[in-house]
């Protein structure tokens, strides 16, 4: 058994008592991010140019899966973050990776003099940096989810981090990335602490997600004052091409 698995099992919180971070996308889309929510039945999602995250109920039934298929469209791949059940017949899991959720447990957050706020005019550079560093999904309107900070050298954006999911009382730190030419300078650490500072200043707590295999990042986050809260999973599934009654599926707008 790996050290990570042991730590997760030792620190994983009991699922018998629901927590707002157990389904953070649902808590966001029914809370501070409700103005983004696109809904069909009990299924909610962000606009696709904002974020691929969507939210199923804790125990989705057949109607929920049908609503998700209608939202996604026939044959579309949809993310199912945190979902650990089986997908129904007709659905196909196309991607799965184990992940972890880490929460503030004494993060010594601090502003950074070199970090500057990023806005809509910076989005092309942000998209370019994301494409080169692959920190995770970042869409043209992702910046609308919260505050983003960047570090520039000679005018070029070389590192950034910002806010994504926003369950009540919490804000997720995401899109942490550094141009490969500037890695090893501690820029990601500085930006994480600067974004966390803004979150704490609002009276909220920062949290984040990463791959369970990314042990170097987990060690870094723990050294900054985050702790492992729970294991999770990141998976994608392809919606059916046809409905259960055999008719062709049609997407809804």
Image (cartoon, helix red, strand yellow):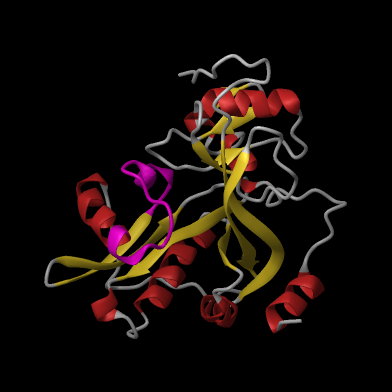
- From this view, report whether residue 197 is shown above or below residue 117: below
Between 148 and 140, the one lying in front of the other is: 140
Q: Locate the C terminus by quadrant.
A: top left
Please indicate whether residue 63 sits to the left or right of residue 127 in the image. right
Instruction: Where is residue 128? Give x, y as percent.
Output: 24, 57
Q: Which residue is drawn at the image coordinates 74% and 34% (left, top)?
A: 60
Residue 116 is at least partly visible in this image: no
State yes or no: residue 135 in magenta: yes
Residue 231 is at least partly visible in this image: yes
Between 236 and 133, the one lying in front of the other is: 236
State yes or no: residue 143 in magenta: yes
Please indicate whether residue 18 sits to the left or right of residue 194 in the image. right
Q: Locate the N terminus by quadrant.
A: bottom right
Q: Which residue is drawn at the image coordinates 39% and 52% (left, top)?
A: 147
Instruction: Where is residue 122? Give x, y as percent.
Output: 22, 52
Q: Which residue is drawn at the image coordinates 54% and 27% (left, top)?
A: 241
Between 67 and 19, the one lying in front of the other is: 67
Q: Which portion, as a residue range, is magenta?
A: 131-147
Q: Which residue is drawn at the image coordinates 62% and 67% (left, top)?
A: 104
Number of labels in the image equals: 0
Instruction: Where is residue 232? Give x, y as percent.
Output: 67, 58
- From this view, report whether residue 111 is shown above or below residue 146: below
Q: Residue furthest front?
A: 246
Instruction: Where is residue 41? Give x, y as percent.
Output: 65, 21
- From this view, report whether residue 67 is shown above or below residue 31: above
Please indicate whether residue 49 sits to the left or right of residue 227 in the image. left
Q: Residue furthest left?
A: 154
Q: Residue furthest right?
A: 16
Quarter of the figure with residue 157: bottom left
């Amino acid at each position: 058994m790996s050290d990570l698995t042991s730590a997760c099992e030792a620190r994983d919180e009991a699922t018998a008592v629901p927590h707002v971070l157990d389904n953070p996308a649902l808590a966001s889309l029914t809370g501070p991010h409700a103005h983004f929510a696109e809904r069909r039945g009990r299924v909610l999602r962000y606009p696709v140019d904002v974020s691929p995250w969507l939210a199923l109920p804790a125990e989705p039934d057949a109607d929920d899966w049908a609503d998700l298929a209608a939202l996604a469209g026939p044959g579309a791949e949809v993310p199912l973050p945190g979902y650990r059940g089986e997908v129904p017949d007709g659905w196909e899991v196309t991607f799965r990776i184990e992940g972890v959720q880490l929460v503030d447990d004494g993060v010594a957050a601090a502003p950074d003099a070199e970090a500057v706020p990023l806005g809509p005019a910076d989005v092309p550079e942000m998209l370019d940096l994301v494409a080169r560093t692959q920190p995770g999904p970042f869409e043209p309107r992702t910046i609308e989810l919260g505050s983003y900070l960047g570090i520039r050298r000679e005018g070029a954006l070389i590192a950034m981090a910002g806010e994504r999911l926003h369950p009540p009382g919490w804000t997720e730190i995401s899109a942490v990335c550094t141009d490969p030419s500037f890695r090893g300078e501690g820029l990601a650490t500085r930006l994480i602490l600067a974004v966390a500072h803004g979150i704490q200043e609002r009276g909220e707590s920062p949290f984040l997600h990463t791959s369970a295999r990314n042990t170097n990042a987990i060690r870094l986050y723990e050294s900054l004052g985050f702790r492992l809260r729970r294991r999770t999973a990141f998976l994608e599934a392809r919606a059916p091409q046809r409905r259960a009654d055999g008719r062709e599926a049609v997407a809804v707008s």
